Image: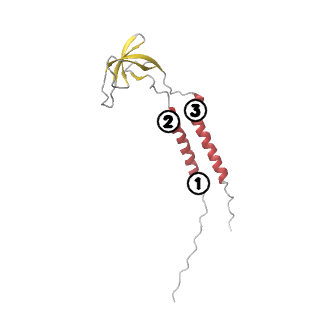
Amino acid sequence: MAPRPAPVRWGLILLAVGLVGLGTALVVWLRPVLAGSPTQLQTREVSAVVVTSTPCTGQAARDVVEIEVEGQKRQAKLDGCGHRQGETLKVALPVPVAAGDLVVLPAGAAPTGPGLEGRLSSVLLALACVAGALYGFLLRVRLPMPRRAKVQPVSQS
């Protein structure tokens, strides 16, 4: 009789996988807090006057606003539509200001980084990696298959 392999301590394995998954999730979740978010967009709030109003019927509908940048008046596309011509509103101007076409957002609508969706997707990706590693481990461990009994042919006399 062949020696039986040592019993697998599934509880210990699941505990280790769970702790690795929890640790990975915490590191990914707290990464922006610990290291700072390099993708954070810096903006400053300025006043803008709507020059051209665009109805909100098209996909790329954007009003044109006039803002003052470094003492010069510039026109920029507002990521919004349907404002009245001549209306004054606050917009978020990206810092530093680009030289080409300028696109501004309404104040308070500027993206500040990956946010909750980015962190949640990173956590889910990490958990999927842990689950894939566990599945690979389970495929690597071969469980003994039960042997089939040989059927003797019945002779007819």
Q: Which mark, by number, is residue 117?
A: 2
Q: Which mark, by number, is residue 81?
A: none
Q: Which residue is mark 1?
A: 138
Labelled pair 3, 1 in contact (Cβ < 8 Å): no
121 left or right of 67?
Answer: right
Task: Kindly state the secondary structure of the residue where label 1 is placed.
Answer: helix
Residue closer to the observer: 58 or 2? 58
Is residue 24 positioned above or below 140 on the image?
Answer: above
Task: Kindly state the secondary structure of the residue where label 2 is placed.
Answer: helix
Q: Amino acid at mark 3?
A: Arg
Which label sits in the foreground, 2 or 1? 2
| N-term mark: 2 or 1 | 2
Q: Amino acid at mark 1?
A: Leu
Residue closer to the observer: 86 or 144? 86
Q: Which mark, by number, is residue 31?
A: 3
Q: CA distance from mark 2 to mark 1?
A: 31 Å
The answer, for residue 65, to whether it is visible in the render is yes
Residue at 31% from the left image edge and 19% from the top image edge: 85
Q: CA distance from mark 3 to mark 1?
A: 31 Å
Residue at 56% from the left image edge and 30% from the top image edge: 32
Labelled pair 2, 1 in contact (Cβ < 8 Å): no
When asked about the image quadrant of residue 104, the answer is top left
Is residue 134 positioned above or below 102 on the image?
Answer: below
